[in-house]
Amino acid sequence: MKQRIFQVLLPGLAWLVTTAAYAQAPADGSVQNKAIPISVTEVAPGLFFQYHHQESNNAWLVTDEGVLVIDTRQHPKRAEELLAAIRKTTDKPIRYVVNTHAHGDHYFGNTVFKREGATIIAHRDTVAMMKAHHGAEMKRRMGYFKQRQFDPGEVTLLLPDVTFESKMTITLGGRMIELLYLGPGQNPGDTLIHFPKERVMFSGGPFSKNSWPNPQFTPSMSNWIDLLRKIAAMDVDKYLGGHGDIGARQDVLNEAQMLSDFDAGMRDAVDKGMSREEIYQNVKFEKYKDIRNYYRMNLFINSYYHFLTTGKPQVALP
Ligand SMILES: [Zn+2]
């Protein structure tokens, strides 16, 4: 069933940061680079998952009537690469794109799929976040564009055509796809794409296997943790995160535990009157140092400190 259909290795760039040096992670979206493996796995018949360790993941469902694609990557050039990967699996038209959340690494490639004729779908709050924060999303990814030598001028905001509020069911070529909204997790508008018959869920922002999520956007850590526990209790075998490799139920529960530990550790530090700088130096959450993105811990501490001391996320739904 699980079949790696191709695997490529792009040459790594020079920028290298060790986990011990996390306090220096830049806020401009530069990524920690070693090599950049990309793999495509057929997780169920016709349902493909593209895993890109250093950037963001995608999935697509191929049916007789066309293709549904989840997320569009961080630049139109990356979207063209995604389209080329899809074209290795099918020549059917691209019917739908779902944007799981309003982070640039999940929607900056929308224009490429619009050109292919896709109808783009997102949660109402995701669209509101895109409208309000597109400029900031661009800004925080300038380091990434520079590293990759991608022209930021090629990215244009292309908003979804269709929105939903709590649930939307799509039938395509006899296959069923459910878009679910269980309230905000990592983000307002976090969309979960459930393939009930295949027992697979694309969990976009809220879950990424063995990967520290950026807490800059969450309006409710407790809702986020509850959401993870809810999806872990569903009849699903494979959880496909917006980042990280294919996860199982236990990986979802592990993230819930990690977020719970992060929340408790941060609340304790703030209650003790520690400054951001003191938290960087003394509360390092080192139990989780081997988790992807740990080198950005300074940024995560900074943003969650903001939340705990102001009651609002750094980046909020307007
Ligand atoms: Zn992302």
Image: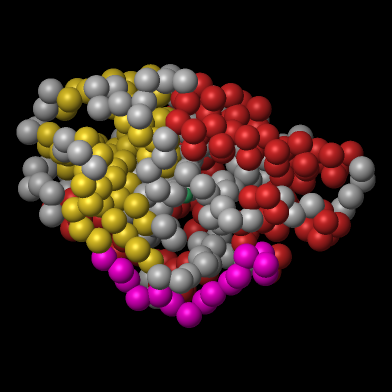
Quarter of the image containing the C terminus?
top right
Q: Is residue 177 left or right of residue 62?
A: right
- Quarter of the image holding residue 290? bottom right
The one nearer the camera, 229 or 152, is 229
Q: Residue 258, percent across and down? A: 63, 40
Q: Residue at x 89, y 50 (%)?
A: 274
Q: Residue at x 56, y 37 (%)?
A: 254
Q: Is 245 a magenta residue?
A: no
312 shown above or below 297: above
The one nearer the camera, 194 or 127, is 194
Colour treatment of the image: secondary structure
The part of the chain drawn in magenta is 8-22
- Determine if residue 289 is in view: yes
Q: Residue at x 43, y 77 (%)?
A: 13
Q: Residue furthest right?
A: 273
Q: Is residue 102 left or right of residue 94?
A: right
- Quarter of the image holding residue 198? top left
Q: Residue 284, percent across and down? A: 74, 54
Q: Is 15 a magenta residue?
A: yes
The one nearer the camera, 122 or 239, is 239
Q: Is residue 155 left or right of residue 174?
A: right
Q: Residue at x 67, y 34 (%)?
A: 260
Q: Residue furthest bottom?
A: 14
Q: Residue 216, percent across and down? A: 63, 46
The one nearer the camera, 289 or 318, is 289
185 shown above or below 297: above
